[in-house]
Amino acid sequence: MPAKNKSELMKITQRDFDKLLATTAGVSPALSLQKDTDGTSIKDVIAHRAHWIDLFLGWHAAGQAGKSPSFPADGYKWNDLKRYNADLRRHQSHLGWEEACALLQDAHDRLSAFLESQNDNALYGAPMKGAKNDWTTGRWAEASGASHYRSAAKYIRARIRLSDKLS
């Protein structure tokens, strides 16, 4: 169930980030780079999550500046997410495990600082400017942070179980 105020949002964002970090603690650099049947690695998932926080922060900043940001990004529509994510994996292919983890930590820190700088009204009082839908800034922040952390942890746990089963 989505958060309804700043306090809840900050709490679930940190809780789910901590759970994700605990999950990644069991990942070796070698395992992090192994591709699944879709060509995605644990490292790719972690770098992806960092990138989506950057997207959210960019969408918010553009909306606050009175601009109309591209969702999800320039040249892509929501129904292009598979292509966008594949392009993102190619763009981030040079990253190693430690670098991907550092990007996620940095993005999480910036998201946390952003949330801390907002109040309940800014997060939940109205739809996010520039978003062209009825989602509040808080809902967008949760989708880009806590929700993404949960799905990443679930993916990583499944990959660890599979690796353990195969070894």
Image (spheres, rainbow, N blue to C red):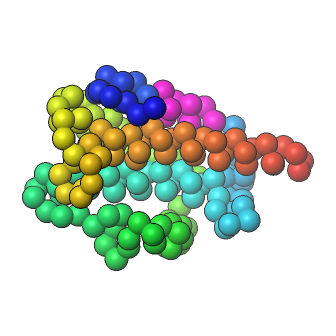
Q: Residue at x 46, y 72 (%)?
A: 80
- From the viewer's perspective, is 76 left or right of 47? left
- Whether residue 159 sits left or right of residue 52 in the image: it is right
Residue 74 image offset from top left, x and y in percent: 31, 72
Q: Residue at x 44, y 51 (%)?
A: 50
Magenta stretch? 15-24
Identify the main secondary structure in magenta: helix
Q: Position of residue 156 (x, y in %)?
A: 66, 45
Residue at the image point whose x is 24% and y is 58% from the top: 132
Q: Nearer the viewer, residue 73 or 25?
A: 73
Residue 140 in picture, x, y percent from top left: 33, 46
- In the rendered image of this protein, does residue 133 appear above or below residue 125? below
Q: Is residue 94 magenta?
A: no
Residue closest to the far bottom: 75
In the figure, residue 154 lies in which quadrant? top right
Residue 14 in view of the camera: no
Q: Is residue 126 above or below residue 70?
A: above
Between 155 and 98, the one nearer to me in the picture: 155
Query: Residue 41: x and y, percent?
Result: 65, 58
Outermost residue toward the left in this view? 66
Q: Quadrant of the N terminus?
A: top left
The residue located at (60%, 31%) in the rendering is 22
Q: Is residue 79 above or below residue 34?
A: below
Q: Is residue 81 left or right of residue 19?
A: left
The answer to whether residue 20 is magenta is: yes
Q: Is residue 48 above or below residue 113?
A: below
Residue 89: tell me if it is visible: yes
